[in-house]
Image: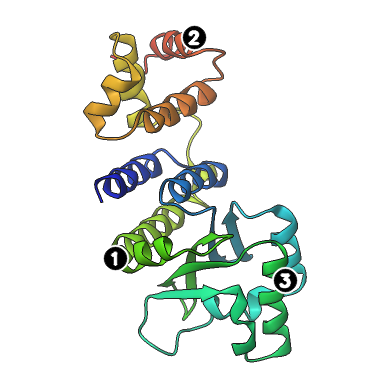
Amino acid sequence: MKDVKRACNEFVDCLHSAHTEDDFRRVAERAAHALGFRWFAYFGQRVNGPNLISSYPKSWTSHYFREGYHNIDPVLQEPRSTNRMFLWDGREARSAKSAKERRLFDDALSFKIRTGLTVRIPSSQNQYAAFTLAVDDRSLGLDRFIETSEDVLYRVGLTYHAHVSAKIGRVSAGSGMASPLTQRERQCLAWISDGKTMQDIAELLNVTPRGVKFHLDNARRNLAALTLPHAVALAFRQGLLP
């Protein structure tokens, strides 16, 4: 459970640095792998239509929308019960309510998307957002993990939805004077400039060194720096570090 808590702490920490769909995709993909899943998918609604952020194969997501599966996918429909999580298995196509829904399950299996869980989140205007974690092979260990970690997994989905809803769509609203770095990215760069290692910083933040690397990679990318020392130098030059 300690590893799960650390993975979730790191997930939340990295979400604060995410601003674009690409950022959110990387954060959730890393969290999914840390929790023992192969893929994640977030489905939300925008004014101009559905929005999907996922690590599923693009061939599957293109097929999914082309077939109109988002209109009949049972995990996206208004729940008839108060269950906040929906456990599904692609082999249960026989329980589908229509031929098209049965084909949805069959097609998902053909892409090796076998089983998973979906957190259903009430959104605006009677719509539902959904955060899914999926695998290509079901196991007793995974079933037990889901059963004992339901509250944790629900919070992961809810937190992800909150950050995406708050930031996606506002990305282009900022002024050109906005800092290219988040507070956490500046903090990690400052510690690097003080001679601390990634392991040192990880212990200070109570995350893994990979989580620290995520922030430093983002900082380097946002500053268009070639190397980490170059990023530190550019941050100092632009007055972003104390």
Q: Amino acid at mark 1?
A: Thr
**Which residue is rendered at x = 66% and y = 61% of the image?**
112
**Which residue is rendered at x = 69% and y = 83% of the image?**
102
Whichever of labels 1 and 2 marks the residue nearer the N terminus, that label is: 1
Q: x and y percent of residue 190 in the render?
A: 31, 16
Badge 3: few (under 14), some or many (20 or more) residues near its Cα, within 10 Å?
some
Image quadrant in which you'd find residue 148: bottom left
Q: x and y percent of residue 192 in the render?
A: 34, 14
| Camera-side residue of 177 and 23 | 23
Asked if marks 3 and 2 touch (Cβ < 8 Å), the reply is no
Query: Which element carries disc 1, helix, strand or loop?
Result: helix
Whichever of labels 3 and 2 marks the residue nearer the N terminus, that label is: 3
Asked if marks 1 and 2 touch (Cβ < 8 Å), the reply is no
**Which residue is rendered at x = 75% and y = 56% of the image?**
59
Q: Which residue is mark 2?
A: 230
Against 162, residue 31 (above or below) is above
Q: Which residue is mark 3?
A: 107
Image quadrant in which you'd find residue 96: bottom right
Cα–Cα gap, marks 1 and 3: 30 Å
Badge 1: few (under 14), some or many (20 or more) residues near its Cα, within 10 Å?
few
Q: Which residue is mark 1?
A: 148
Q: Amino acid at mark 2?
A: His
Badge 2: few (under 14), some or many (20 or more) residues near its Cα, within 10 Å?
some
- Residue 170 visible from this viewpoint: yes
Query: Which element carries disc 2, helix, strand or loop?
Result: helix
Against 181, residue 53 (above or below) is below
Cα–Cα gap, marks 1 and 2: 45 Å
Q: Nearer the viewer, mark 1 or mark 2?
A: 1
